[in-house]
Image (cartoon, coloured by chain):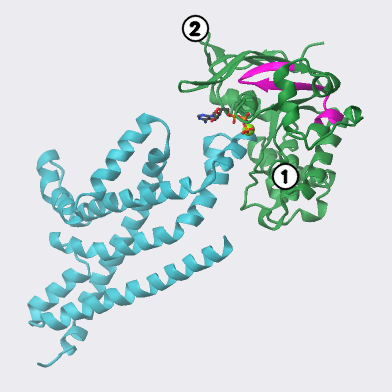
Amino acid sequence: MQWDFQSLLNNWRALLTGLTGTLSLAVVCILAAALIGLVVGAGRYSRRGFARWPATAFVEFFRNTPVLVLIIWFYFAFPILTGQKLSAFTAAAIAISLNGGAFAAEIFRGGMQSLARGQWDAARAIGMNYPQLMRRVILPQAIKRMLPAFTNRAIEILKTTAIASIVAYYELLHSARVIAAADFNPIEAYTAVAIIFFALVYPLTIVARSVERRLRVSE
Amino acid sequence: MQPILSIRDLHKSFGALEVIKGVDLDVMKGEAIAILGASGSGKSTLLRCVNLLEQPSRGTIALGGQTIGADRGNGLRHYSGADLVAVRKRVGMVFQQFNLFPHMTALQNVIEGPVTVKGRPRAEAEALGRKLLDKVGLSEKADVYPARLSGGQQQRVAIARALAMEPDVMLFDEATSALDPELVGEVLRAIRQLAEEGMTMLIVTHELGFAYHVADRVIFLHQGLIHEQGSPQEVLVAPREARTREFLEGHGQFRLPDRAP
Ligand SMILES: Nc1ncnc2c1ncn2[C@@H]1O[C@H](COP(=O)(O)OP(=O)(O)OP(=O)(O)O)[C@@H](O)[C@H]1O
Ligand SMILES: [Mg+2]
């Protein structure tokens, strides 16, 4: 068989649009997941039932539902239920963020639990209120500890964005499908997407690993 | 004269376990009180109730004649967030495990309270912080992180951190128990200096010699109640209660000078 990457080069615009779509969806989802994780993670950590129970339910539900099912639900079922149509981007962003947020919440909770109880006591004993002790004492230490796990989660999210092609969101995988359909070169198109994903993700895992190593040394 | 700290009928339970069972205590300004007691007798819990790290189950705490919290009618009190902050600004605490903030230098640890809680200008807080570090003998360690300080140095930074809030009362919960023996002295000296300057203090300690020489009053806590109290001479040298004697005999490695034959 003959590899013909020339047709791909002719379609570089489509690939570039796909890459932009992948990256913008990933960035939005990573930020949203971090925010959701912070809020829900604080709820999970709370000793108050009214904060802990909903947070626990959230985490359990969204950790244990396939992202693919969530995307399809938000794209096809949600509009029927509410009369509000969502764009492919929005449906995918919501679904991936909820799933990523559930995992991030557990990372945040773990990071906060890894801090000695004495840090809370010391912060309270000098008169800090909850927002002050979070901002000045707990989060700076907890975030440092959860950075490696969170970087890995961000990488997972980046890879998961490919699922958004199921609702025809224009990201890398979708662009490959478009190119393959037009030029009858599925092998080259899908191989190119795999290589591009690898080229995006692999450096990130290297960075994550070195961050992890550096933090372990500084402990 | 009115006591600076007044504890009335203090109770504290954790679930079904009642740890403090009705403590009454008046502390006068400038008084240094040593609190002794066996492990589990409730010493830490009593101190933690004073600055509301634990909320009392019953009873009242008054600072400078002002009873903390709002009466809820049924003998219980409600402590608002503002109450907690107000009390902790006036009551400093030093912990057995130091609990310094590891991501801040010694000086940053000390000025954190004044800057973040009291809203003091940074320059002013730093001047105060350096003065306090100097007072505990650590002026040259201002920019060092806790991980690079010895236990005794960390504990002295923790004392400076508590003092930086300019409290009316200081609580010490076994401040030297986690230290290697050769580092105990430097921390006790810092506490003693405070006592001599007239700081009001509640000091939970197992250092009987220190209690004898520094405390104005010694309290023996047993099963959540003040079992015996009096001058160091009364409680440590001539205790009336059998329990107190038993406890003191358990600290046999220490001999009070007066008791020596
Ligand atoms: N947060 C808590 N929840 C449940 N039980 C607690 C809690 N804090 C303390 N206790 C219990 O209360 C009792 C008294 O504890 P406390 O720490 O006040 O004793 P202590 O006199 O300081 O002892 P030690 O000399 O070992 O420090 C113990 O039985 C302890 O297990
Ligand atoms: Mg204790």
Residue at 77 percent across and 15 percent down: it is B240
In the rendered image, the residue lying farthest to the bottom is: A2
Does ligand 2 reach within 8 Å of label 1's beta carbon?
Answer: no
Quadrant position of residue B71? top right
Of tags 1 and 2, the one toward the viewer is 1
Q: Where is residue B50 in the image (x, y as percent from the top left)?
A: 64, 24
Magenta highlight on residue A122: no
Q: Which portion, as a residue range, is magenta?
A: B211-228
The three-letter code of the residue at mark 2 reads Asn
Magenta highlight on residue B226: yes
Which chain does the cyan colour mark? A
Front in this rendered view, residue B190 or B219: B219
Find disc 1 in the rendering and name its residue: B155
- Decide: few, some or many residues near mark 1? Use Cα within 10 Å; few <14, some 14-19, many ≥20: many
Front in this rendered view, residue B175 or B4: B175
Please state the quadrant of the image where ligand 2 appears.
top right
- Decide: few, some or many residues near mark 2? Use Cα within 10 Å; few <14, some 14-19, many ≥20: few
Quadrant location of the C terminus of chain B in the rendered image:
top right
Label 1 to label 2: alpha-carbon separation = 41 Å
Q: Tell me the colour chain B is drawn in.
A: green
Residue at 67 percent across and 35 percent down: it is B118
Q: Where is residue B235 in the image (x, y as percent from the top left)?
A: 80, 20
Determine the chain carrying the residue at label 1: B
- In primary-sequence order, the first of circles 1 and 2 is 2
The three-letter code of the residue at mark 1 reads Gln
The label on residue B191 is: none
Quadrant position of residue A40? top left
Left or right: A61 in relation to A85: right
Q: Position of residue A33 (x, y in %)?
A: 34, 52
Q: Where is residue B225 in the image (x, y as percent from the top left)?
A: 64, 17
Find disc 2 in the rendering and name its residue: B74
Does ligand 1 reach within 8 Å of label 2's beta carbon?
Answer: no
